[in-house]
Image (tube, rainbow, N blue to C red):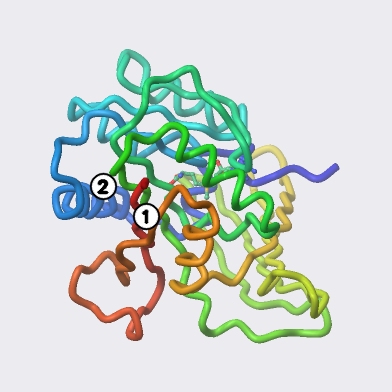
């Protein structure tokens, strides 16, 4: 079986085109958003699909209690190593589709890195929202970061989308990204295939991740929230801005759900 890029936590950040300061900017936006939509201080936060929880590391160092969930033992191990000594940051190995935690309720939850659309089945989205709702206080805020999906075309054959190179320290990574075709009746927008050839000094490793992507726009997220009967969608912000109209979204948007 081919490996996944998530088995290489240090490298995946460069592959995902994360720039220095991106995570700090996201955390700062989340804090502003909580002040705007939550009338009480945020002391306990849930980080969904946290990976090594770079957001949680910043928040926990600032005094917030953070629990992160992720399915990848490698990402969690990297997070635990990076957060060594910060007791306020805890990791749990869980799947996002349905989970429970031995934790008190949280003031807020977030799902960053544009990963929510990998949940393509209606059932998974609803059990996910129920799982998050069970851990959030009434009035708590759930922020979901979603990629702008306005420019992807439907295709009939596996198609090379982009070829690029990333550098992670001394290691060069050749990246090929493909779109794969979908069945017309699927609740999906595309299937994204990420192939990375990682050139370590002594060997090369090829990773492949095949990621189904569901088309999610603000009205669809509003519908999911209503269908869950646990949330209402109260805002949608484009590109980490409180003022840019959603119609002018360039790269990503953030759904804000409130726990009923
Ligand atoms: C792009 S990374 C983002 C990690 C982190 N939030 C960040 O901003 O760096 C996506 C994460 O989602 C996790 N993931 C993907 N599918 C998952 C699932 N079904 N259940 C739990 N975690 C999942 C992966 O293991 C990976 O760590």
Q: Residue at x 14, y 38 (%)?
A: 40
Element at label 1: strand
Specify whether 59 is left or right of 212: left
Which of 205 and 135 lies nearest the eye of the viewer? 135
Q: Give the alpha-carbon distance from disc 1 to disc 2, as whole Å.
A: 17 Å
Residue 1 picture location, percent across and down = 85, 42
**What is the count of numbered marks?**
2
Residue 171 picture location, percent across and down = 55, 47
Give the quadrant of residue 68.
Answer: top left
Badge 2: how crowded within 10 Å, few (<14), some, or many (20+)? some
Which of 167 and 43 lies nearest the eye of the viewer? 43
Which of 98 and 152 lies nearest the eye of the viewer? 98
Q: Residue at x 45, y 21 (%)?
A: 80
Q: Which mark is residue 27?
A: 2
Give the quadrant of residue 169.
Answer: top left
Element at label 2: helix
Residue 129 picture location, percent across and down = 52, 46
Badge 1: how crowded within 10 Å, few (<14), some, or many (20+)? many
Read off the residue under disc 1: 257
Specify whether 58 is left or right of 166: left
Up-down relation of residue 116 to residue 98 (above or below):
below
Up-down relation of residue 208 to residue 245 (above or below):
above
Q: Residue at x 34, y 58 (%)?
A: 256
Q: Residue at x 29, y 35 (%)?
A: 107
Specify whether 234 is left or right of 133: left
Q: Nearer the viewer, mark 1 or mark 2?
A: 1
Q: Quadrant of ligand 1?
A: top right
Earlier sequence position, callout 1 versus callout 2: 2
Badges 1 and 2: C-beta atoms under 8 Å apart? no
């Amino acid at each position: 079986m081919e490996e996944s890029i998530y088995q290489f936590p240090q490298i995946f950040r460069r592959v995902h085109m994360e720039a220095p300061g991106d995570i700090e900017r996201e955390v700062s936006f989340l804090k502003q958003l909580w002040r705007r939509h939550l009338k009480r201080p945020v002391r306990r936060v849930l980080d969904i699909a946290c990976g090594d929880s770079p957001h949680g590391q910043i928040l926990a160092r600032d005094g917030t209690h953070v629990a992160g969930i992720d399915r990848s033992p490698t990402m969690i191990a990297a997070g635990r190593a990076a957060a060594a000594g910060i007791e306020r940051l805890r990791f749990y190995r869980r799947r996002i589709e349905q989970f429970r935690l031995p934790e008190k309720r949280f003031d807020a939850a977030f799902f960053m890195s544009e990963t929510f659309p990998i949940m393509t089945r209606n059932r998974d989205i609803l059990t996910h929202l129920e799982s998050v709702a069970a851990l959030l206080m009434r009035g708590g805020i759930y922020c979901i970061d979603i990629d702008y999906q306005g420019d992807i075309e439907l295709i009939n054959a596996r198609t090379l989308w982009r070829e690029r190179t990333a550098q992670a320290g001394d290691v060069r990574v050749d990246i090929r990204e493909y779109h794969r075709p979908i069945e017309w009746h699927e609740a999906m927008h595309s299937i994204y295939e990420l192939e990375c050839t990682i050139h370590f000094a002594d060997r090369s490793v090829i990773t492949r991740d095949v990621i189904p992507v569901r088309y999610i726009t603000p009205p669809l997220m509003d519908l999911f929230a209503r269908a869950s009967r646990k949330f209402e969608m109260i805002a949608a912000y484009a590109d980490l801005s409180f003022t840019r109209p959603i119609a002018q979204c360039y790269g990503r948007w953030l759904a804000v759900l409130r726990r009923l």
